Every structure is written in structure tokens, then in C-alpha cells.
Image (cartoon, rainbow, N blue to C red):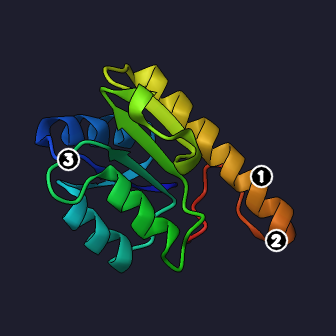
Amino acid sequence: MYNILIVDDEKMVSEVLQQILSRFGYHAEVALGGHEALCMFDDGLFDLVITDIRMPGVDGYDVVRHIRNSDRPYTPIIGISGTPWLLKDHEFDGIIPKPFGTQTLLSAVKSVMSRALALHRGAYGKTLPAEGESHLT
């Protein structure tokens, strides 16, 4: 099971994303803003981060920079935004424009995690778990 960090300053959006992902077998934790996300990322182990971009204070770009400069820079990141044309594709492993449906979310998660797993398998051989399993267990 993948461990996913959801970052959004809108509590309702975060909770809906968490419910959807949980219903489909993912473990999802919520950070209600960028600052909380940085602390959770540093203290936890996440297979994927899904972050809103426009948030007060520490925004989604700050979250991305923090992750890319951490000891886990290859953690996949999906950016979600109501203004996707402002996103810089090279900073994210996937982009989901708001509003989006359940299938769009699940397809993006599966696609990004499949690519990440394939890259890690190529770099480290067959020591990594199968698709759908966390590298943390």
C-alpha cells in the first residue's frame, strides 16, 4: 500500500481526497498547508506527495523545492491547481487541473507511481516491491 501525503489548505478538499484514496487502498495523510507538509514530510516516509499550488504562506512550489532538496529528492509529486497553466511541468511528476473527478485522480496516482517504480527498479534492480506495495514495508 502506498503512503501518500495530501497537501491542501482547503480542509474539505483534503478530506475528500483522503477518503477517495483510502477507499481505493491507499494510505493517505493530510497536511492543511505547506508548513505542516514540510514537517510531516521530514518526520514521515511518503511514497507520493499530492500538493495544491496556491496556498497562503508556504505554497506548493515551496513544498516541491523542499522535497527536491531533501534526502528523498526523487519522491514523486503531483501538483493540483485551478490554474494549471501556471505550473511548471518539469517540477512535477504529474499535474491535475481542478476541478477533477475520482478517475482522473486515480489515473494520475497510478501513472506517476508506475513510472517511479519502473525508474527505481531500473536503478536498483529487482530489490524493490511490486507495484502497489510501499517501499517502506
Secondary structure, mark 2, is helix
Secondary structure, mark 3, is loop
Q: Which numbered marker is on residue 118?
A: 1
Q: Is residue 128 above or below residue 48?
A: below
Residue drawn at (13%, 36%) of the image? 12
How far is disc 1 from disc 3 in space, using C-alphas? 32 Å
Q: Residues within 10 Å of mark 2 (few under 14, many from 20)?
A: few
How far is disc 2 from disc 1 in space, using C-alphas? 10 Å
Position in image of residue 14 (x %, y %) = 22, 42
Q: Is residue 42 above or below residue 100?
A: below
Mark 1 or mark 3: whose residue is earlier in sequence: 3
Q: Evaluate whether residue 78 shows in this view.
A: yes
Residue type, label 3: Met
Position in image of residue 13 (x %, y %) = 20, 35
Q: Is residue 94 left or right of residue 126?
A: left
Residue drawn at (76%, 56%) of the image? 119
Q: Evaluate whether residue 126 shows in this view.
A: no
- Quadrant of the image occupied by residue 86: top left
| Pointers 2 and 3 in contact (C-beta within 8 Å) | no
Position in image of residue 50 (x %, y %) = 40, 47
Determine which residue is flagged by label 3. Answer: 55
Residue type, label 2: Tyr
Q: Residues within 10 Å of mark 1 (few under 14, many from 20)?
A: some
Front-lying residue, 30 or 84: 84
Q: Is residue 114 left or right of residue 87?
A: right
Mark 2 or mark 3: whose residue is earlier in sequence: 3
Q: Is residue 126 above or below residue 12?
A: below
Determine which residue is flagged by label 2. Answer: 124
Residue drawn at (33%, 27%) of the image? 83
- Which mark is in front, 2 or 3? 3
- Quadrant of the image occupied by residue 65: bottom left
Position in image of residue 115 (x %, y %) = 70, 46
